[in-house]
Every structure is written in structure tokens, then in C-alpha cells.
């Protein structure tokens, strides 16, 4: 269209006259938006941000395309510009210095924003607003300062979400404008979209390649983990849920580092973990894990296990809990020496006792409490040895002192194939600092009992079972509000803590429905259920444990943790910990 017509139409529009039919509809719509946004036509004032992501994924993908265009346009009065999704310039290439000076004068340079609400109608901002390629020539620009130019913008879409990621813009002087600019801009935008797509698939492809290579040379369990995404070979699908969760958490800490090997204890025994972090460009994308077993071996093989079912009298149907039930049942039936691991109060003893009752009802059940304060571990040890086919439970093995460890080693030096030896460790993982580490060769299987906070779905049946046990024959239950508070608890003391909370509540309300006010609130109400990183989870657990030990005294807890009270409050609020301890 004749530029003089547009010039006159723009003058009329700026004086408030009715829209002129000679102006292209989308340009007129943009002028109106510019007026509504309060953009002055006679002044030019756009924001500058020096802290943009100039090296982000869009800029990185666009770089080869911009380099190529720069070569092709060398010596020509044309510039190519990349902006982010807010119209802020990330990169600018200019073919010739005269144009570069002119563009500098209108701040068409990295860091400045050409969003329509700042710069009025222009190839960048108007393309962002309309979502379609746009050519803006001379007087079609809303502000006076941009009238000497012509610019064609084309949106760059994310290949999967289809959201606009940025704009590719070609600019020259108005008298040299051509429709070809639009074609060129849109071809360049498509090339960038293709590179974005390659980048999106680069991570998964690299992870898949590493996974397939590992599976090809190994029959061991192999997992590829990237955030919440997991790929497993068939051996890994047979790992108990608790092991898979443990490995997934470990993977978070291993991604981004160097490849390597470490030892860890899984349900089937002490294991070696071989890990290969996978990169995508400069970003870490995930990690491939391969598990091989070392010292302890689950002779039945996890895959050979019958579907797990709970023990009579014990509540819970969570997969990890049922895995533990199944593993203990098999160990009891075959008199396989087993090490049972789990946080204090998680239900280790209850499980072992139930497995013995079900599988070995006619054998003697002897408990040797290895804690230093225990009355007479020596007597119990003698009793245990009297029977060659009894069940011997070494409780609190993690707290055994050197003398007890030596006595245990001597006592069980002679194999007794019909005896069922069970060691219990009140910890979620086996650390080398724990005394029974030296006794690991006594056991053939390790069984993990999951903490209560990892199986919150089991809370309702557990509450019901515990209420039945604590108030036999009485009609007792929980109100909806009390149940909600219980469901939100962190339960650092696990089932034992739940039991003591219900016991306290029953003192206040011996029959009927327990109300929220009856609960001693010796639990944590976690409002935030977001997934914590491994480090955060460890920090959260430490805070909860310390508060639990100090009965909710935050001054003492802060002192023990070596942090200020303000920091403790801040961390509690970040983790959604509302309360731990005894309410008055
Ligand atoms: N699934 C369950 N159903 C019903 N009651 C349970 C269940 N699990 C645990 N309990 C009860 O919770 C309490 C604590 O369990 P238990 O003593 O077995 O824990 P633990 O892991 O052996 O603790 P610690 O390591 O401190 O010795 C016991 O009274 C037990 O009967």
C-alpha cells in the first residue's frame, strides 16, 4: 500500500479520528492496543534488562541459524534479531555498520524490550500479540522513532508445547522493505524450531542409548532415571517397591556427577551400584543404574516370590509393606537368617513375631535385646542356644556394644540350619558405623520395613487396628478432622508414635469418636506435600527427629541443630512442618 496513505491514516488515527479503511486490519488493531497500553507516539522509552538468559536453550539452538544468516547477509543493510517470549532482544546480527548505528539509536539491541506495550506496533511486539508472522513497514509503526524501519517477525514455537518461545525478526530500512523478509524470518524460525526439537529429544535419546547398552551386556537389574521418569529392564521391575524408591532417590544425587560405583544395602542383600550419569548438551539429564548383589543373596529370587499378603492382626496393604511381609514369610519358612532394617517403631518386631507365629508356631521364640540398657542379653543368648531349631531375634542390634557383638559372633559360629536367626536394626539404611556391620556374614537376606510416612495410605487401617487393640470391645473411632490431622502427620516415631498418640487421645475420650482436640498433637502436620530432594528430605527428617526428641522445644532443637531459632522456623515453614511435640 502507498506509504503516504498510511502516513496520513496514522496522523488521523493519532488525532483521534475514526479508523481508516486503508490501514491493514492487524496494524490498526495493534495501534489500538498501543493506545490502550499508554505508549506515547512522540516519545520512545523502552526498558532494558542486562540479566536476561542470553545463553539459555533458545539462544543456544538459534545460534547456528543466526550464524548462517549473518554470513549470508554480510555487507547488506539488514539485521537479524532473536528475542525471548517477552520481546526482549537476546541476540542481534547486523550485516552492515551504517544500519548498526541506526539500530543502536533506537536501542534495537540485546537486553532491550520491544514488547508492544513498550515500543508500540513493531515486528517483534506485534508478532507476539497476534501470534502470526507480521511485516510492519515505515508509518505502520506506532511510534515516530520506528518509522524509518521495516521489520518482519516470525514466532518460534516450542516443538512439544507449541508455546511461543521467542521471535525471529528481520529488520531493514523502510525503503528497502519486501514481503520476502517475512518468508526469510519464518524459514529461520522453523529452522530454530527443528533444533529445539532435536534438543528436546537429545536427553531421552542419550538416556535410552545408555540404558540399552547396559541391558545388552548385563542381566542384572538396570534402571534409567530422569526426574520422575523411570525405565527398567525386567530384572529391575521385580525389585521390591522400597528398593526402586531408594534407587530413584539415590539417582537424584548421582545425576550430574561422574560415573562410578558404590555399595548399598537393598532388600535382597548388600549390593554394588554402578551408575552412569547422562548429559544432554551441558545439562545433566538423568542416570543409568545397574545393581549387582555382593554379600547377601536372596536365594528364592525376588521374581519367584508368591504374591505378598499381610499377616493376620497386622494392618497395611502398601506395596512396600507387603513386600516386607512376603520376604519375612519366605525367610521364616526356610529358616533363612535375615536382617530386618527400618526406622524405630516402623513395625519390625511386630512383623517378625507375626512371621514366626504363622510359619514356625511350634518353635520357641527368643528375643535377645542387644541394647546396652537391656537387662540380661547373656541369659537370653544362652536360652536361644538351647534350641537348635528355635527363632532367635537379636533386637536393637544397631546399639550392641563390642562385648555383645563378640558374644553373638561366638554364639552363632556353629551353623544350625533349622534355627531362624533374625537381626533387627532400627535404621533405614545400613551404615558402616553401625556395630552389626561386622556381623553381616551371619545373615543371608536383608528386609526393609518402610517408614510410616512412605505408606500414608495405610494410616486408616492402622488407626482402626490400633484402636481395636487399645480399646478392645469399646465403640471408638476418629472424627473427620482428627483423621485429617493424622493423615497430615510426618510420624517420625512411625507406628509406635501413632499408637502413643491414640493411647493419649483415648484417655481424653475413652468411647465415641476422637476429636481433633483430643489428640495430643505429638505429631507433625505437614501442609506441604511437594516432593523433596534427597538433601531436603534428609534435612526435614533431621529437624523432625530433633523436635521429636526435644518434645517440640524449638529453643533446644535449634541449639542441638546448631542453627538460630529464626532459621529453624524458616526451615520448618519451608518444609510445611507445622507442629512437632506436646501441645498444652
Ligand atoms: N502393621 C501393624 N498393624 C498393627 N500394629 C502395628 C503394625 N506395625 C506396628 N504395630 C504396632 O506398633 C508398635 C511398634 O511396632 P514395633 O515394636 O514392631 O516396631 P519396631 O520397628 O520393632 O520398633 P523399634 O525399632 O523401636 O524396636 C507395636 O505396638 C506394634 O504392635
Image (spheres, helix red, strand yellow):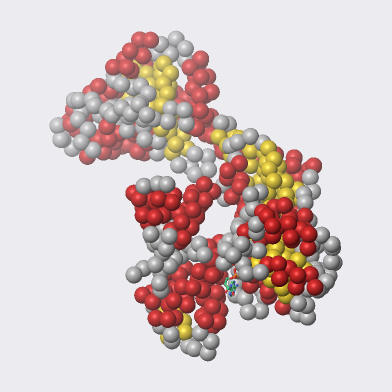
In the drawing, does residue 428 fall left or right of residue 555? right
* Residue at screen point 50% across, 62% down: 492
Q: Quadrant of ligand 1?
A: bottom right
Q: Position of residue 81 (x, y in %)?
A: 41, 24
In the drawing, does residue 176 fall left or right of residue 419? left
* Residue at screen point 40% across, 72% down: 520
* Residue at screen point 45% across, 42% down: 163
* Quadrant of res 582: bottom left
228 shown above or below 94: below
Q: Position of residue 123 (x, y in %)?
A: 36, 29
In the drawing, does residue 445 fall left or right of residue 187? right
Q: Position of residue 314 (x, y in %)?
A: 62, 76
Where is the N terminus found, in terms of image quarters? top left
* Quadrant of res 262: top right
468 shown above or below 104: below
The answer to whether residue 288 is visible is: yes
Closer to us: 386 or 345: 386
Where is the C terminus found, in terms of image quarters? bottom left
152 shown above or below 37: above
Closer to us: 240 or 1: 240
129 shown above or below 88: below
Tag count in the figure?
0
Q: Position of residue 93 (x, y in %)?
A: 43, 18
Closer to us: 273 or 435: 435
* Residue at screen point 18% across, 31% down: 14
In the drawing, does residue 159 fall left or right of residue 561? right
Amino acid at each position: 500500500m502507498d506509504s503516504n496513505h498510511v502516513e496520513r491514516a496514522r496522523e488521523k488515527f493519532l488525532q483521534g479520528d475514526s479508523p481508516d479503511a486503508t490501514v491493514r486490519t492487524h496494524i490498526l488493531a495493534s495501534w489500538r492496543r498501543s493506545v490502550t497500553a499508554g505508549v506515547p507516539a512522540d516519545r520512545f522509552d523502552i526498558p532494558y534488562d542486562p540479566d536476561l538468559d542470553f545463553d539459555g536453550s533458545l539462544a543456544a539452538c538459534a545460534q547456528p541459524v543466526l550464524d548462517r544468516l549473518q554470513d549470508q547477509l554480510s555487507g547488506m543493510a539488514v539485521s537479524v534479531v532473536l528475542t525471548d517470549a517477552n520481546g526482549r532482544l537476546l541476540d542481534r546480527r547486523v550485516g552492515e555498520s551504517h544500519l548498526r548505528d541506526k539500530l543502536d539509536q533506537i536501542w534495537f539491541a540485546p537486553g532491550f524490550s520491544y514488547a508492544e506495550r513498550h515500543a508500540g506496533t513493531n515486528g517483534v511486539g506485534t508478532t507476539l500479540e497476534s501470534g502470526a508472522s507480521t511485516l510492519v513497514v515505515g508509518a505502520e509503526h506506532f511510534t515516530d522513532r520506528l518509522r524509518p524501519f521495516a521489520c518482519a517477525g516470525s514466532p518460534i514455537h516450542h516443538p512439544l508445547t507449541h508455546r511461543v518461545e521467542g521471535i525471529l525478526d528481520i529488520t531493514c530500512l523502510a525503503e528497502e522493505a519486501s514481503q520476502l523478509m517475512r518468508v526469510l524470518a519464518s524459514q529461520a524460525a522453523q529452522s530454530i524450531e527443528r533444533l529445539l526439537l532435536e534438543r528436546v529429544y537429545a536427553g531421552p535419546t542419550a538416556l535410552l542409548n545408555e540404558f540399552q547398552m547396559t541391558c545388552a551386556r548385563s542381566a542384572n537389574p538396570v534402571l534409567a532415571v530422569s526426574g520422575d521418569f523411570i525405565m527398567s529392564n525386567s530384572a529391575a521391575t521385580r525389585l521390591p517397591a522400597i528398593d526402586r524408591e531408594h534407587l530413584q532417590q539415590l539417582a537424584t544425587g548421582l545425576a550430574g556427577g561422574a560415573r562410578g560405583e558404590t555399595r548399598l544395602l537393598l532388600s535382597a542383600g548388600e549390593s554394588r551400584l554402578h551408575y552412569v550419569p547422562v548429559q544432554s548438551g551441558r545439562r545433566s539429564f538423568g542416570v543409568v543404574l545397574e545393581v549387582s548383589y555382593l554379600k547377601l543373596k536372596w536365594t528364592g529370587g525376588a521374581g519367584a516370590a508368591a504374591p505378598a499378603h499381610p499377616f493376620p492382626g497386622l494392618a497395611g496393604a502398601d506395596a512396600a509393606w507387603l513386600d516386607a511381609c512376603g520376604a519375612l514369610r519366605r525367610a521364616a519358612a526356610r529358616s533363612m537368617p535375615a536382617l530386618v532394617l527400618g526406622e524405630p517403631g516402623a513395625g519390625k518386631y511386630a512383623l517378625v513375631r507375626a512371621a514366626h507365629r504363622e510359619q514356625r508356631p511350634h518353635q520357641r521364640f527368643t528375643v535377645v535385646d542387644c541394647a546396652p540398657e537391656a537387662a540380661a542379653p547373656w541369659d537370653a543368648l544362652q536360652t536361644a542356644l538351647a534350641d537348635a531349631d528355635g527363632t532367635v531375634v537379636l533386637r536393637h542390634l544397631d546399639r550392641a556394644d563390642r562385648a555383645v557383638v563378640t558374644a553373638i559372633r561366638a554364639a552363632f559360629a556353629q551353623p544350625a540350619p533349622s534355627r531362624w536367626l533374625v537381626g533387627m536394626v532400627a535404621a533405614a539404611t545400613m551404615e558402616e558405623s553401625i556395630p552389626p556391620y561386622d556381623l553381616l556374614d551371619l545373615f543371608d537376606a536383608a528386609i526393609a520395613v518402610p517408614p510410616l510416612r512412605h505408606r500414608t495410605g495405610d494410616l486408616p487401617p492402622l488407626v482402626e487396628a490400633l484402636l481395636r487393640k487399645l480399646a478392645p470391645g469399646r465403640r471408638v473411632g476418629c472424627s473427620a478432622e482428627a483423621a485429617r490431622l493424622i493423615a497430615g502427620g510426618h510420624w517420625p516415631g512411625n507406628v509406635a508414635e501413632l499408637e502413643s498418640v491414640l493411647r493419649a487421645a483415648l484417655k481424653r475420650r475413652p468411647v465415641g469418636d476422637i476429636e481433633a482436640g483430643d489428640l495430643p498433637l505429638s505429631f507433625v502436620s505437614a501442609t506441604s506435600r511437594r516432593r523433596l530432594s534427597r538433601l531436603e528430605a534428609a534435612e526435614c527428617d533431621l529437624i523432625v527427629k530433633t523436635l521429636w526428641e526435644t518434645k517440640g522445644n524449638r529453643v533446644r532443637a535449634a541449639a542441638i541443630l546448631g542453627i538460630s531459632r529464626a532459621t529453624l522456623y524458616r526451615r520448618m515453614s519451608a518444609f510445611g512442618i507445622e507442629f512437632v511435640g506436646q501441645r498444652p
